[in-house]
Image (spheres, rainbow, N blue to C red):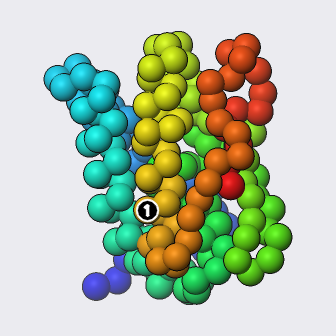
Amino acid sequence: MSSRYASLSRDELARLVPELLLIGQLIDRSGMAWCIQAFGREEMAQIAIEEWASASPVYTRRMQRALGFEGDDVVTIFKGLQLDIGAPPQFMDFRYTVHDKWSGEFHLDHCGALMDVEPMGPDYVRSMCHDIEDPTFDATAIATNARAQVRPLHRPPRVPAGRSPTAPGR
């Protein structure tokens, strides 16, 4: 079966893919609001972790095969994060530094997830930026390399709230 996107040029795809990623993120985010209402913040966090951790290995490997950048190094992990449904360019602004084949850093110049939860208070910031992100960034990296780890150098809460940058990590 041929993809409906197969006839698009590279330039057309470069404009379309960020929009598709944002659509997917918005659909997911609306589901999480329902989970908060129905089950509370802590259960929503567990649902988000399970959802991402179970889906990431599937779509990460599929995306790598489709775009021809399979590997097990940090560059491959970072390429995958650039196209991750949970981090669309309009929602998250990742900046990457590759130190060598096996290590690198990223930080976010803008984090839509933090901007969403910060007005809801410190418990929501901790749920998003600690409880959810720790295992889900690992799940995304492990989909490329079973020994990979993502460990934060700094993360919210921001003191004072609203300052920049938003959510650095490594």
Query: Is residue 59 found left or right of 101 in the rendered image?
Result: left
Residue 164 appears at what percent x and percent y? 78, 27
Hey, which residue is sitting farthest left in the picture?
Answer: 38
Q: Residue at x 64, y 66 (%)?
A: 78
Q: Above or below — where is 70 with respect to 165? A: below
Q: Is residue 94 visible?
A: no
- Quick one: label 1, few (<14), some, or many (20+) residues within 10 Å? many
Q: Above or below — where is 78 with respect to 165? A: below
Query: What residue does disc 1 label?
Result: 139
Residue 30 appears at what percent x and percent y? 33, 32
Q: Residue at x 38, y 35 (%)?
A: 29
Identified by mark 1, the residue type is: Ala
Q: Residue at x 43, y 62 (%)?
A: 139
Q: Above or below — where is 1 with respect to 94? A: below
Q: Above or below — where is 62 with respect to 11? A: below
Task: Report the quarter where the C terminus lies.
Answer: bottom right
Determine the secondary structure under disc 1: helix
Number of residue marks: 1
Residue 72 appears at what percent x and percent y? 58, 83
Which of the two residues, 90 or 38, is positioned nearer the viewer here? 38
Task: Report the quarter where the N terminus lies.
Answer: bottom left
Q: Is residue 139 visible?
A: yes
Which of the two residues, 2 or 33, is positioned nearer the viewer here? 33
Q: Residue at x 47, y 84 (%)?
A: 65
Which of the two residues, 164 or 129, is positioned nearer the viewer here? 129
